Amino acid sequence: SRLSVHCYNELLKSLCRVDQVKEALIYFKQMLSAKIAPNRETFRIFMNFYAKKGDVENTLDWLNEHKRSFFTEDDQTREIVIQAFERSGNSQKMIEFFEKQD
């Protein structure tokens, strides 16, 4: 039987947990090639990975991918972005992002 988005998400999450994001990106592309559509969780996996590193740019890039896939921002994605700003030490940008959400 065909692998589901949930199986891919588990693999992607595990690879990111052990700092193998390059490998995770390979499997993400494989998932897309197999015509398996990512879901909200798929994008959050990568957003969380970069947010934990304080990598705001990549966190926001994945948020934009999330939006390009017709998912709207929600509290969970906003929380991840705020955490990215926190870890980067840029509280001013964090506040600006927060204030734009209303």
Image: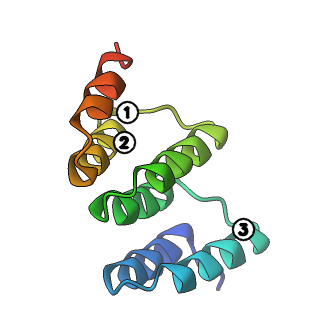
Structure colour scheme: rainbow
On the picture, is 43 further left or further right than 102?
A: right
Quadrant in which the C terminus is drawn: top left
* Badge 1: residue crowd in 10 Å (few <14, some 14–19, many ≥20): few
Q: Is mark 3 on a helix, strand or loop?
A: helix
Residue 40 is situated, as x and y percent measured from the top left of the image, at: 48, 50
* Badge 2: residue crowd in 10 Å (few <14, some 14–19, many ≥20): many
For residue 98, above or below residue 87: above
**Residue at (61%, 47%) from the top-left corner?**
65
Whole-Å distance between the Cαs marked 1 and 2?
A: 5 Å
Quadrant in which the N terminus is drawn: bottom right
* Badge 3: residue crowd in 10 Å (few <14, some 14–19, many ≥20): few
The image quadrant that residue 5 belongs to is: bottom right
Asked whether the beta carbons under mark 1 and mark 2 sit within 8 Å of each other, the answer is yes
Residue 59 is situated, as x and y percent measured from the top left of the image, at: 44, 52
**Residue at (22%, 36%) from the top-left corner?**
91
Amino acid tagged 2: Thr
Q: Is mark 2 on a helix, strand or loop?
A: helix
Which of the two residues, 81 or 95, is positioned nearer the viewer here?
Answer: 95
Whole-Å distance between the Cαs marked 2 and 3?
A: 21 Å
Whole-Å distance between the Cαs marked 3 and 1?
A: 23 Å
* Residue 32, numbered label: 3
Amino acid tagged 1: Asp
Asked whether the beta carbons under mark 3 and mark 1 sit within 8 Å of each other, the answer is no
N-terminal label among 2 and 3: 3
Which of the two residues, 95 or 9, is positioned nearer the viewer here?
Answer: 95
Residue denoted by label 2: 77
Residue 63 is situated, as x and y percent measured from the top left of the image, at: 50, 44
Residue 83 is situated, as x and y percent measured from the top left of the image, at: 24, 48
Asked whether the beta carbons under mark 2 and mark 3 sit within 8 Å of each other, the answer is no
N-terminal label among 3 and 1: 3
Residue denoted by label 1: 74
